Image (tube, rainbow, N blue to C red):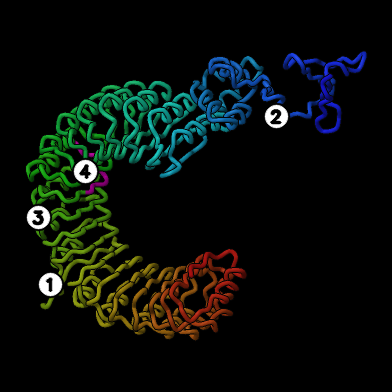
Amino acid sequence: MPALVNYRGDHDFYSGDSLPSGDSGLVFSIGSHVEIYCPPRKRSRIVGPCIVGGNFFEDKRPSIDILPDECLFEIFKRLPSGQERSASACVSKRWLTVLSGARNSEFMNTDKASNNTNEDVEMECDGYLTRCVEGKKATDVRLAAIAVGTSSRGGLGKLSIRGSNSARGVSNHGLSAIARGCPSLRVLSLWNVPSIGDEGLIEIARECHSLEKLDLCQCPSITNTGLAAIAEKCPNLTALTIESCPQIGNKSLQAIAKYCPKLQSITIKDCAFIGDQGIASLMSSASTVLNKVKLQALNVTDYSIAVIGHYGKAITSLVLSGLQNVSQKGFWVMGNAQGLRMLSSLIITSCGGMTDLSLEALAKGCPSLKQMCLKKCCFVSDNGLVAFAKAAKSLESLQLEECNRITQIGILNAISSSSSKLKSVSLVKCMGIKDLSTEFPILSPCESLRCLSIRSCPGFGSTSLAMVGKLCPNLHHLDLSGLCGITDNGLLPLLECCEAGLAKVHLSDCLNLTDEVILALARLHGETLELLNVDGCKNISDASLVALAHSCPLLNDLDVSKCSITDSGVAALSCGVQHNLQILSLSGCSMISNKSMNALEKLGRTLVGLNLQHCYSISCSTIEVLTENLWRCDILS
């Protein structure tokens, strides 16, 4: 007779002739000589496959995963809310794929049938949420998770994808999941995503009809087909940026002009297939309401610029950069076409066609022009600048950067002859400026000028600075950063001429200035001074801090980095009249030591930012104490 088989000592298995009478257990035959008896129990003690006589038995429990995707979807769509769907998507990648493959509207219909109010349904697609995925985190799986997870929490309104995972980056599948799950999407930015092409963009166009802003940068796989689909299906588009997309051309802009009557802002940069035909179609469209236009590094000619000048009646902001095929004639026609009557801001960079003649024409043809910026326009000279200043009756801000034919004579005459509305003048890296050695004729002062910035113009010296002071008696903001040639004798007359009181003064890297200037500044403008930056002025010492501490009650931003400041200066500042000092930078002040800790803690009552970088005489333990005690202040060390 077969022997008794006993596993675990609980008589789980018995031979066929030893079965208890009246038992309701089950009997399984596994051969001609052996049977297995399984007595009833609340739960099985055997959780794995059983091996008896070389045979295998598996616990074949019913699983939802054996169902096809269609059945899984029918189950998921009957979940009562988006929260349950989000939880289900976390179970496995397959469940996430099934859920992200469905349109949001298919679930919302079920929500209505489940007695959800209309307010609940509307809330799911209002588009409150913003998501940004970058680099390694930019994958299709993450986009699918965003598509499923955001629907129940206000809906996705803005999505930015920057870069892509090199191994399993974002593709059309991920963007399609966003399209199906996020119909509320209003803003989409795609930067450097080579795997996304027309298929993904067409899906966005098919599902996201509320799209208002589209930003495409370095998307080599997107062509006219994808962008044309957006134009046709997204009539609410108001802002479009196309940058470094080599497959996008004129046909896209023609579709935009035809189907997007609400477009207000467009930026096009470095797209070789976009030329005169596309720009002309966009600008001449009867339905266009464009008010912001930026064209950079395009193969357009005088024709496009002339069309802008004729049809740009609604344009208020215009940026033209790197248009190498546009000549003086194109800019001259743009000004004389008299179509830019509403233009208030104009920026022209690296355009060889910008000359004295075209600059004057723009001033006459743009009567509402308030802000003018010229960068790297090497053919503009003093004559054109003065003529422009006289003709631009509404000009408030003038910025010149790397315009090397401009000299002191042109600058001073332009300021003197400008309209009574001019408030700000900025000169940056203008190498043609050289200090005047002869007496200059008396000019009329510009009473309206409030902000003067002359930065990194090495030829600008003390003589010119004194003349500027006479022309600008009402300055509030003064920026002379990087003017190595100015001295105390040149700056003091300017400080004495500023009758209104200076509020913000930037003197960083003015290497020849000394405490004498700061003492005069504190004496003459201490009641109005709010910001002072003398970073890199190595001749500024504790005497300047003592003067500031006693005379500048409104000072809230002070930068004395790399100056000759010691513990005594910091102590004097902490005992001063400043009650609103919020930003203090002592970076590179190597003579400040641990002795300043008490003074810094006292100053820290109002500080929100303290820079102690490269203060090598302050120990790490002192920094730790300051960080702990000044918990409201951001400390850089």
Which of the 4 image quarters holds residue 179? top left
In this rendering, position of residue 225 left or right of residue 331: right
**For residue 107, above or below residue 135:** above
User: Which residues lie in the magenta part?
Assistant: 339-347
Residue of label 1: 441
Q: Residues within 10 Å of mark 4 (few under 14, many from 20)?
A: many
Q: Is residue 346 within the magenta segment?
A: yes
Query: Residue at coordinates 55% horizontally, 32% vertically from top-left?
Result: 149
Label 3 sits on residue: 379
Image mark for residue 296: 4
Amino acid at pointer 2: Gly
Whether residue 113 can be seen here:
yes
In the rendered image of this protein, does residue 346 appear above or below residue 141?
below
Q: Nearer the viewer, mark 2 or mark 1?
A: 2
- Characterize the magenta stretch by its predominant secondary structure: loop
Q: Which residue is mark 2?
A: 48
Q: Quadrant of residue 440?
A: bottom left
